[in-house]
């Protein structure tokens, strides 16, 4: 197994480099989710009668890279979790054993696969599916390899759930926490109820990481007591701010319809009555789109171009207002474990020149002032173990490069029991994270 683990580490790194460039092919080499019975819960006991984190199905398969099987085995689990509306649902996670692992240490790695298509989830890539949107899961191998080589088990949840509820942060969080519960309960995964976990994620993965850390004390105290800390970068805090920040930009405006589609899907409301004819065309294209279908393809796009004139202010839509406030991390609880938050602020490098009053600048898609405000809020509400790092000259994609090794070292130190660093008292002021309010009458 040691030789196989070395082979998978080498293959993972090679695949990550290979998939760093755009993928031209979109052919599938394995059964799709719709045809794969593993993804369906078909037990006789209602999910509502099953505890969150309970393992429902288990399978072991070869870890695939770009559709090709490798010598290493991965364990995949179907488990009971909770969706954005608090309803019982079934989630999927993948476990990769570390080199010489004894099951005592694990990292939950939250992917930034960012898609509205369930076929693009990490578990599908591991099982052998190959697609343009799924290429991200292969590229992320570079984030996984350092932990595998150090002997950590790595757990990779499909954070968006089986309906791909992109940007629905609370659902990302519950899925991540229940994935840890399932991995800890599964005899096939090699962990147990005492396995310590670190949380790791960038961009879309940071959404899941932070929401998991915030929800853990209340939703999963059994997991929270085993968390050593969380490390994240490029974080979405207040989505209402982000939609205004990226509007009119060059690269990132496509996330406007993507994020609103995902949140509407998660919370079950219909956007059609509020959209212009052009908006209906764009949203129709987004129903199963990946982030790779959005980047750079809608330059200059704004919400106002997507909506009917009567709804030019999205806060005039009650369902939107309710949902966007539910996914605002500023209204969530404060994590009780140490955290490392990193954020770029060179968004002009990715074509976002916005600097709106009350929102300010960011990395091209994420708002730096929001992340600073969240870090300061955590410090002010009882968590003094918050490390904050801002890369003023780096954009969203660029900031991931220095963040990754720093995050690895940060979590290594937490597992080693070293005192957590703190930047509390030194973090510059940020934005208000207060809930959005209804648009004034007549607007």
Image (cartoon, helix red, strand yellow):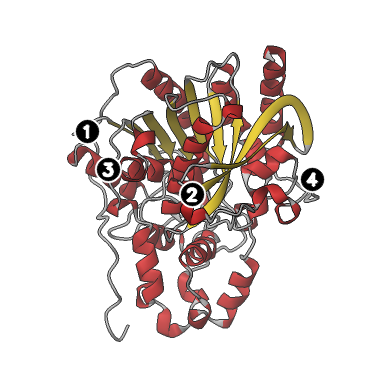
Q: At numbered mark 3, what does the secondary structure look like: helix, strand or loop?
A: loop
N-terminal-most mark, 4 or 3: 4
Asked whether the residues under the numbered discs 1 and 3 touch, taking CB atoms below 8 Å apart as contact, a structural biologist would say no
Give me the residue at 34% from left, 62% from top.
325
- In this rendering, which labeled residue sits more in front, label 2 or label 4? 2
- Residue 156 sits in which quadrant? top right
Give me the residue at 49% from left, 67% from top.
264
Label 2 crowding class (10 Å Cα cut-off): few <14, some 14-19, many 20+? Answer: some
Give me the residue at 49% from left, 62% from top.
266
Give the spatial CA distance, label 2 vs label 4: 30 Å
Return the residue at label 3: 334
Q: Quadrant of the C terminus?
A: bottom left
Return the residue at label 4: 30
Location of residue 148 with respect to 382 vertically, above or below:
above
Return the residue at label 2: 50
N-terminal-most mark, 2 or 4: 4
Label 1 crowding class (10 Å Cα cut-off): few <14, some 14-19, many 20+? Answer: some
N-terminal-most mark, 3 or 2: 2
| Residue 226: x %, y % from top left | 37, 28
Q: At numbered mark 1, what does the secondary structure look like: helix, strand or loop?
A: loop
Label 4 crowding class (10 Å Cα cut-off): few <14, some 14-19, many 20+? Answer: some
Asked whether the residues under the numbered discs 1 and 4 touch, taking CB atoms below 8 Å apart as contact, a structural biologist would say no
């Amino acid at each position: 197994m040691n030789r196989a683990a070395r082979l998978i580490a080498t293959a993972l790194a090679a695949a990550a480099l290979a998939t760093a460039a755009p993928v031209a092919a979109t052919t599938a080499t394995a059964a799709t989710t719709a045809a794969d019975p593993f993804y369906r819960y078909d037990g006789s006991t209602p999910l509502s009668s099953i505890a969150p984190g309970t393992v429902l199905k288990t399978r072991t398969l070869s870890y695939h890279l770009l559709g090709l099987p490798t010598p290493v085995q991965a364990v995949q689990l179907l488990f009971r979790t909770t969706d954005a509306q608090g309803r019982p649902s079934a989630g999927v996670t993948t476990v990769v054993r570390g080199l010489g692992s004894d099951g005592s240490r694990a990292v939950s790695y939250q992917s930034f696969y960012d898609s509205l298509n369930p076929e693009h989830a990490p578990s599908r890539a591991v099982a052998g599916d190959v697609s343009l949107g799924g290429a991200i899961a292969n590229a992320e191998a570079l984030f996984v390899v350092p932990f595998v080589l150090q002997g950590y088990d790595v757990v990779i949840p499909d954070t968006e759930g089986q309906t791909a509820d992109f940007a629905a942060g609370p659902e990302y969080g519950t899925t991540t926490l229940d994935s840890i519960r399932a991995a800890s309960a599964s005899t096939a995964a090699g962990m147990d109820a005492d396995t310590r976990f670190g949380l790791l994620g960038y961009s879309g993965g940071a959404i899941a990481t932070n929401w998991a850390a915030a929800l853990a004390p209340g939703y999963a105290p059994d997991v929270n007591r085993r968390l050593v800390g969380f490390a994240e970068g490029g974080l979405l805090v207040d989505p209402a701010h982000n939609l205004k920040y990226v509007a009119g930009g060059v690269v990132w405006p496509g996330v406007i319809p993507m994020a609103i589609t995902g949140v509407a899907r998660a919370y079950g409301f219909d956007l059609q009555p509020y959209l212009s004819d052009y908006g209906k065309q764009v949203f129709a294209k987004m129903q199963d789109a990946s982030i790779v279908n959005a980047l750079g393809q809608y330059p200059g796009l704004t919400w106002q171009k997507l909506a009917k004139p009567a709804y030019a202010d999205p806060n005039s839509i009650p369902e939107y207002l309710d949902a966007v406030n539910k996914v605002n991390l500023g209204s969530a609880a404060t994590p009780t474990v140490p955290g490392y938050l990193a954020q770029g602020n060179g968004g002009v490098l990715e074509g976002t020149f916005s600097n709106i009053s009350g929102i300010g600048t960011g990395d091209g898609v994420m708002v730096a002032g929001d992340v600073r405000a969240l870090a300061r809020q955590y410090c002010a509400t009882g968590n003094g173990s918050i490390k904050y790092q801002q890369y003023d000259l780096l954009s969203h994609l660029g900031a991931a490069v220095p963040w990754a090794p720093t995050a690895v070292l940060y979590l290594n130190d937490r597992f080693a029991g070293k005192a957590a660093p703190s930047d509390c008292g030194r973090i510059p002021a940020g934005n208000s994270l207060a809930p959005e309010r209804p648009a004034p009458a007549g607007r």
